[in-house]
Image (cartoon, rainbow, N blue to C red):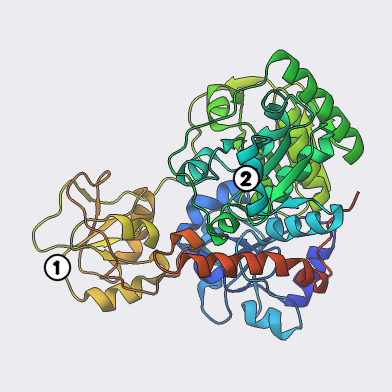
Amino acid sequence: MQGVSARRVSELLAGAGELALLDVREQGVHYRGHPFFACSAPLSRLELVIGDLVPRKTVRVVVLDGGGEGLAEKAERKLGELGYTDVAVLEGGCQGWKADGLELFSGVNVPSKAFGEFVEHHYATPRIAPGELKRLQQLKKVVVVDSRPFEEYHRMNIPGGIDMPGAELVWRIHDLAPSPDTLVVVNCAGRTRSIIGCQSLRNAGIPNPVVALKDGTMGWELAGYTVERGAERVAPPPSDDGRKKALAAAERVAKRFGVRSCTSRDLAAWKEDNSRTLYLLDVRPREEFERARVGGSRHAPGGQLVQASDEYVGVRNARVVLIDPERVRAVMSASWLIQMGWPEVYVLEDAKLTESGPRTPRAPAPPPWPTVATIPDGAAVLDLSTSLRFYKAHIPGAWWGVRSRLGEARRAIGDVPLLVLTSDDGLVAKFAAPEAAGLFRKVVVLEGPWRGPTESGVERATTTRDDVWYKPYDHSADYLKHARDYLDWEVALVEQIKRDPTIRFRAF
């Protein structure tokens, strides 16, 4: 095992070289506390996420767990099997990090969340209280745009709001608010995308007054107002006049924030450069990405890329190329990554769209393993889906477990003649089968998705339900308390980041 001290990792994070710092605990455990730049890459799903998160196999990688758990060592061996050549374990894990006087941050997507608070503080991004918005809506002097992906918007939104995900704002707003007297209110679930969306429109210089809804839909409900559910209002693509205004706005932003461009020739050369990590990210909506895209690119819708950068780019100081044939969405996304401190961000000028259809993630093929189409009599079923998915629906009588804790599953289930593994994607179960075979008498994998009856609940959990982070609205009880706690956490980040010298947000 190759180890590296917390102090050394902190020095590397403060430097200009490439480094991937990966927390291999489950996301719900990662949530409790981790180094600021540690990306969540759970051991349970490592094969499925690592190819996109860390695409260059010769880059320096440091893996960590809580300290003394053995998960980091398992991840080091797994990454070696997958071809990664420079992997080390953080000595002492999170405990060692804290013992060296370094800062631990709770939460998920912390760099993006903290950046949102930094933006509001630095730019004095204006906001509006829910009560004032309610009053203005009655006077019909306002347009509300929701900066989240459609799935989140559709689940719950401010009444009357129109879906316009983050990077789409500057592209689509001009036709929805043609009068400069119309107030534009940007909201999301909480704070970050409201702040970034509002400031995007302000940075772009649109003539309308623009504000962020204080605390988003959570703040709306905390104020005692009801949300709308199932809405399907989506902002249309821009008209010719709207497109001209959007392009002009993007050019202003590119000039102000120093957004650089590159060509397909540059891109071809960078793909051959084995000394640098390259991310090729298409920031358009999924339907545009799947209709036609640049070969080898990955879908990373602009608003989500800024909101959760650590889920898309796992290597610090890597080279990032953003794609949008219309430029606007790529320029806006690039302007924010630059302010977050990414040193090499480019917008592709001459995108050649040569692929189409759904993209297959970079992941190895799972090992071959016997499968069954139905559940044999007397077999036990272990579902390795997330606890959230399992809670909503699972095979009647199935147990729930976590791949990295199969020993706990064995103790809970006991000595059964046959264990059937399943998971929501089918892949986690296949990767887990050889490991489970060392603990159970006989193991098979359920072939394909389950088509039979289901039940809900998590009565047969074999381990703690901390595999994923539960958003405030994922809690069936006391939602408002969880929403308040979450919003308080976000606001406190702006002070906490001052205690970590490796954080270098840029102020323009």
For residue 14, what is the image quadrant? bottom right
Observer able to see residue 272 = no
Q: Earlier in the sequence, mark 2 or mark 1?
A: 2
Q: Closer to us: mark 2 or mark 1?
A: 2
- Compared to 471, does 229 lie above or below? above
What residue sits right under mark 1 in the picture?
A: 417
Q: Residue furthest left?
A: 377
Which picture quadrant has residue 249?
A: top right
Q: Label 2 sits on what residue type?
A: Gln
Image coords of residue 426 (percent x, y):
34, 49
Q: Is residue 4 visible?
A: yes
- Give the quarter of the figure containing the N terminus: bottom right
Q: Few, some or many C-alpha atoms within 10 Å of disc 2 (few <14, some 14-19, many ≥20)?
A: many
Q: Give the residue number, with chain letter if any, for mark 2.
A: 304
The amino acid type, in three-letter code, at marker 1 is Pro
Left or right of residue 213: residue 73: left
Q: Residue 100 in the image: x percent, y percent?
A: 75, 83
**Location of residue 294 by image quarter:** top right
Q: Label 2's element? A: helix
Q: Residues within 10 Å of mark 1 (few under 14, many from 20)?
A: few
Q: Does 421 sit above or below residue 282?
A: below
